[in-house]
Amino acid sequence: MKAISKIFGLMLTIAVAFSSCSSDDDGPSPVRQEKDTTYVYTAVIKGLAPSNGGKIEYNLPDITLAQILGETNAKNFLSGEFQNTGGYLEVSGLKNMTTSPSLQNFTLQVNSNTPVNFGTCKVNGSGNNEFSSDTQQSGNKYITFINPIFNSVVSNSRKASLKIFFTPSEDIQESDKILLKIAIRGIYKYNTYPTTAK
C-alpha cells in the first residue's frame, strides 16, 4: 500500500511540475488594440499623350494592410470598420505644370471590380464631367470607390490592387511629380503581445 501511495504521490508531483512549465511557456496574454487612422496611399501618374487618341492604362502598386498597420500588427489583425468621413481622392501637381494638362476619362479600378470613370481631371475643373486637380475630392462617388479598397485590404488577401486609365492632353513624365492620393480612414482592431522581462 505504501508503494502505491509513493507512486501516486510521485505521479502527482510530476503532473504539477508539467502544469507549471506549461503555463510558463504560454507567454503573455494578447492585448486588444483599436486604432482609428487615416492612411494616405500615394502613387505616381505618368503617360505620354497618344497621337491616336488612345488611353494610358497600367497597374499601380498594391495597397496592403501591412503598409497601414505595420507588419507585426497586420499579422495579428482581427477586424476593421470603414469610416465614411476623412477619406478623399486627389490628383495633385497639375497646377505646377506650365501647360496645365488635363487627364481625360480619369478611371480607376479596384481588383476586378467595375472601373469607375471620374471624368476629366483638370486645373479648376468645374464642368459636369470634370473635377479639379489639387483638391481633395470627398463626395459620395469618391467615398463609394474607396470603400471596396478598404474591404479588400481587411479581407483574407490583406491587399487591394489598383489599375489606372486616362488620356493625357500633354506628355506627363515621372519628373513632373503628378500624384494620385487616396486617403482611407478606418478603425482597425488587432492584438499586441507585451514582452516580459526574463
Image (tube, rainbow, N blue to C red):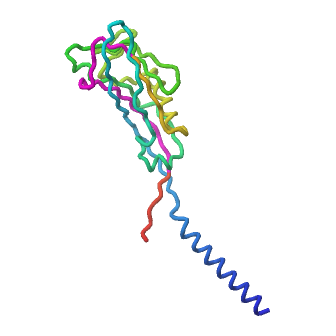
Q: Is the magenta stretch mostly helix, strand or loop?
A: strand
Q: Which of 54 and 80 is in front in this view?
A: 54
In this picture, residue 53 sits left or right of residue 31: left
Q: Position of residue 48 (x, y in %)?
A: 30, 16
Residue 104's place in the image compared with 33, above or below, is above
For the point 51% across and 40% down, the residue is 80
Q: Quadrant of the C terminus?
A: bottom left
In this picture, residue 151 sits left or right of residue 70: right
In the rendered structure, which segment of residues is drawn in magenta? Answer: 166-190
Q: In terms of image quadrants, where is residue 56?
A: top left
Q: Nearer the viewer, residue 185 or 104?
A: 104
Residue situated furthest top in the rendering: 52
Q: In terms of image quadrants, where is residue 197?
A: bottom left
For the point 48% across and 24% down, the residue is 144
Q: Position of residue 86 (x, y in %)?
A: 40, 32
Q: Quadrant of the N terminus?
A: bottom right
In this picture, residue 172 sits left or right of residue 188: left
Residue situated furthest left in the rendering: 98
Q: Where is residue 50 in the image (x, y as percent from the top left)?
A: 33, 11
180 part of magenta stretch: yes
64 part of magenta stretch: no
Q: Which of 65 and 132 is in front in this view?
A: 65
For the point 31% across and 12% down, the residue is 49
Residue 70's place in the image compared with 137, above or below, is below
Residue 124's place in the image compared with 24, above or below, is above
Q: How many marks?
A: 0
